[in-house]
Amino acid sequence: MLEIIGGLIGLGFLVLAILMCRQESKIRKINFWVALLICFLTTPIFGYFIISSFALRNPIGCQWCGNSENEVEFCGVCGKNTEGITEQELKQADKGSDFTHQS
Ligand SMILES: [Zn+2]
């Protein structure tokens, strides 16, 4: 009986750890798997303190069109990254470097 209770508590901690890591990795600058690893290595309670010390994720914003809520690498409004290069331009640049690599 005690084993079952212990197992349920363990399972409960596991579920809580996963949910907590998912939530925290969304709002903080930490990868979900890294957060989960910290939880397993330090126990979820101590892990939570470590994870909660990570900086909050702030939107990158876009300096090119003023879209302050941009959170992705390429701006959803103008399509540029922080260097002012669009995804298409970057792909073309990659193709160019592949070409020079082959020759
Ligand atoms: Zn933009």
Image (spheres, rainbow, N blue to C red):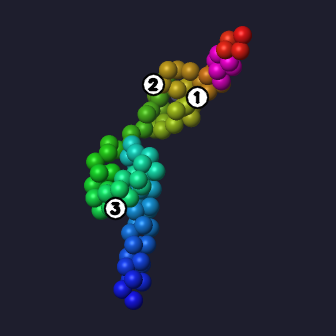
Q: Quadrant for the N terminus, please.
A: bottom left
**Extreme residue in the front direction:** 3
Gap in angstroms between the C-alphas marked 3 and 1: 39 Å
Query: What is the quadrant of residue 40 in the picture?
Result: bottom left
Say what amino acid the circle numbered 3 marks: Pro
- Give the residue pinned by disc 1: 79
On the rendered structure, is 65 left or right of 36?
A: right
Gap in angstroms between the C-alphas marked 1 and 2: 12 Å
* N-terminal label among 3 and 1: 3
- Give the residue pinned by disc 3: 44
- Badge 3: residue crowd in 10 Å (few <14, some 14–19, many ≥20): many
Q: Are marks 1 and 2 in contact (CB under 8 Å)?
A: no
* N-terminal label among 2 and 3: 3
Which range is magenta? 91-99
Q: Quadrant for the C terminus, please.
A: top right
- Badge 2: residue crowd in 10 Å (few <14, some 14–19, many ≥20): some
Main secondary structure type of the part rendered in magenta? helix
- Give the residue pinned by disc 2: 63
Question: Residue 78 location in percent, x, y?
Answer: 57, 28
CB at disc 1 and ligand 1 closer than 8 Å: yes
Of helix, strand and loop, which one carries label 2? loop
Query: What is the quadrant of residue 7 in the picture?
Result: bottom left
Residue at 41% in and 53% down: 37
Say what amino acid the circle numbered 1 marks: Gly
Nearest to the eye among marks 3 and 1: give it. Answer: 3
